[in-house]
């Protein structure tokens, strides 16, 4: 079956199926694959089980394929697919497809590429983008040596780059089972999976963990036999690495820098934020990186097809300090100009997160007279506190450690970690 | 609908300035005649005070750059904000 580990399994709550069964169910529902072989198709799915069934069907038959949740469709999104020559195939009613394509390719745009996988990203603009990948570029775990058998909790949004990465791990790497989550509240889904003893590994974002650490009983978290943790999607700060290392001292904790364009590029396993600057000197291998004008550029064998193996401007700002490269945020929205002095949200957030009472922090710029803008902070505290006392506590925490202009001036204290569908905040 | 006529008196403005200073561990203002330098009231404190006043009166203040340049004492700061909050 085209390199697919058909005996790897996927759990959906208490039910566990292998990929062979999922593929058989999709074949029963969708019928012969030759109806799709001359088209670029995205299957419209409802729920994670039909998404994974549709995905394995597309891979087994080497189709030009992808999946999207029905809930993400809108007239604008359908128009975007139509412009790109994508046919939508309805797979929403569980295994009872309505086979009509909902979008017709325009002239000259109806190309199809066997084995292409269409990954959807909305980026920071909210505009849906279609990124062309393949089994090879999405199989980023092939670089991880000695990966023991695992059961991976998959919290990501169906059809996103991170979701495909995890699906490919389960499909292509022997011994890697998946634990799917359909719950509206991911922390609840994770809690349920932990209670069933299903999870030994997880890939997620720092925001997911901060939400989980507030929502799930710590004794349950500690009791889980988790031995592999991957973090990515956002800047991974030292505070969350230390917290997870404290909870799971025997687990391999990695943070992975990846984007839908560059693919997974940098894997860091030394327990420290940022990455070793020696990577900048490496000029061969699957991934090379460079810094130009403070921006990170990547050349990666895991990049999307359109990149053509060239340098990709990640749009991420980085800074080299003491042999380490640290992420400072996005070039377009992370720098705060305070009366001509520059401060980076990521640096301020990292310092706030080093306070033991802070679970989550977001720093943004707010327009202010005289100095142009001031940093303002939104914070989630481990325990509710008087806001005035909390402001003073955190201002003192910053005093002498951050430049005066970088210390947040206005604070808001939220009750819960805000989590977007991308698991970022 | 926002209340366009919400204003702040001198006592309330001074209270905001003092709360900004207190948060940074600095002494409260003892005399309106003090220069802003002597009161340790800096440009960042001025900007924070402006934002906090805007939050209290629920609207953005219009600033007159020329008046801002003339500010030398604590009294000037209070006068400035008093005028700004009264502006339509």
Image (cartoon, rainbow, N blue to C red):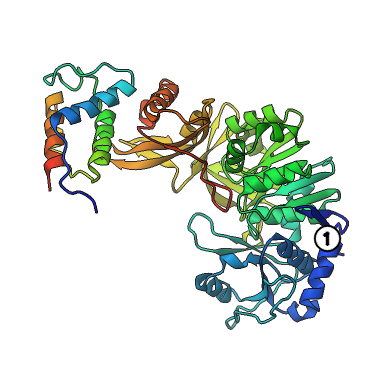
Q: Is residue A110 above or below residue A168?
A: below
- Visible in this render: residue B64? no
Q: Residue at x 73, y 75 (%)?
A: A96
Q: Chain of mark 1?
A: A
Q: Residue at x 67, y 75 (%)?
A: A89
- Residue closer to the observer: A322 or A223: A223
Crowding at mark 1 (Cα within 10 Å: few <14, some 14-19, many 20+) = many
Image spot of residue B42 (x, y percent): 25, 26
- Residue closer to the observer: A17 or A101: A17
Q: Is residue A119 above or below residue B75?
A: below
Q: Residue at x 27, y 38 (%)?
A: B51
- Visible in this render: residue A132? yes
Image spot of residue A220 (x, y percent): 71, 35
Q: Is residue A276 left or right of residue A32?
A: left
How many numbered discs sit on the rendered protein?
A: 1
Image spot of residue A210 (x, y percent): 58, 38
User: Residue beneath label 1, please?
Assistant: A19
Q: Is residue A163 left or right of residue A391?
A: right
Image spot of residue A297 (x, y percent): 58, 47
Quadrant of the snapshot with the N terminus of chain A: bottom right
Instruction: Give the secondary structure at mark 1.
Output: helix
- Residue closer to the observer: A25 or A142: A25
């Amino acid at each position: 079956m085209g390199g697919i580990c058909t005996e790897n399994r996927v759990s959906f709550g208490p039910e566990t199926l292998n990929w062979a069964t999922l593929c058989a169910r999709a074949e029963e529902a969708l019928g012969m694959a030759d109806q799709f072989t001359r088209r670029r198709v995205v299957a419209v799915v409802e729920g994670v089980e039909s998404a994974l069934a549709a995905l394995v069907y597309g891979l087994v038959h080497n189709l030009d394929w992808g999946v999207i949740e029905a809930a993400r469709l809108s007239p604008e999104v359908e128009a975007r697919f139509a412009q790109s020559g994508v046919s939508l195939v309805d797979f929403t009613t569980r295994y009872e497809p309505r086979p009509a394509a909902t979008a017709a390719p325009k002239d000259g745009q109806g190309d199809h590429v066997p084995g292409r996988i269409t990954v959807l990203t909305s980026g920071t603009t909210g505009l849906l983008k279609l990124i062309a990948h393949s089994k090879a570029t999405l199989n980023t775990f092939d670089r991880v040596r000695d990966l023991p058998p695992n059961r991976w909790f998959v919290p990501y949004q169906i059809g996103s780059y991170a979701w495909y990465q995890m699906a490919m791990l389960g499909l292509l790497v022997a011994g890697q089972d998946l634990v799917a989550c359909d719950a509206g509240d991911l922390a609840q889904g994770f809690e349920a999976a932990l209670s069933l003893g299903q999870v030994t590994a997880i890939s997620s974002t720092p925001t997911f963990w901060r939400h989980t650490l507030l929502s799930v009983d710590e004794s349950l978290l500690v009791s889980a036999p988790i031995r592999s943790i991957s973090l990515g999607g956002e800047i991974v700060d030292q505070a969350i690495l230390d917290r997870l290392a404290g909870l799971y001292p025997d687990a391999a904790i990695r943070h992975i820098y990846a984007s839908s364009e560059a693919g997974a590029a940098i894997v860091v396993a030394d327990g420290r934020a940022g990455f070793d600057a020696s990577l900048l000197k490496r000029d061969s291998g699957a991934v090379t990186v460079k810094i130009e004008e403070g921006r990170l550029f990547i050349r990666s064998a895991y990049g999307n097809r359109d990149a053509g193996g060239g340098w990709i401007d990640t749009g991420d700002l980085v800074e080299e300090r003491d042999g380490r490269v640290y992420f400072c945020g996005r070039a377009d929205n992370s720098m705060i100009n305070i009366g001509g002095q520059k401060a980076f949200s990521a640096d301020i957030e990292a310092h706030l997160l080093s306070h033991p009472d802070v679970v989550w922090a977001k720093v943004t710029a707010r327009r202010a007279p005289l100095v142009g803008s001031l940093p303002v902070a939104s914070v989630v505290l481990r325990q509710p506190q008087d806001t005035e006392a909390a402001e003073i506590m955190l201002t003192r925490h910053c005093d002498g450690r951050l430049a005066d202009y970088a210390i947040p001036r206005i604070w808001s204290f939220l009750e819960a970690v805000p989590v977007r569908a991308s698991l970022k905040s | 609908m926002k209340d366009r006529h919400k204003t702040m008196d001198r006592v309330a403005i001074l209270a905001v300035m003092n709360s900004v200073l207190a948060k940074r561990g600095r002494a409260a203002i003892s005399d309106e005649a003090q220069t802003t330098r002597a009161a340790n009231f800096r440009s960042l404190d001025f900007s924070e005070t402006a934002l906090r006043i805007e939050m209290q009166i629920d609207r953005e203040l219009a600033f007159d750059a020329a008046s801002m340049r003339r500010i030398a004492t604590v009294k000037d700061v209070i006068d400035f904000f008093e005028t700004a909050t009264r502006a339509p």
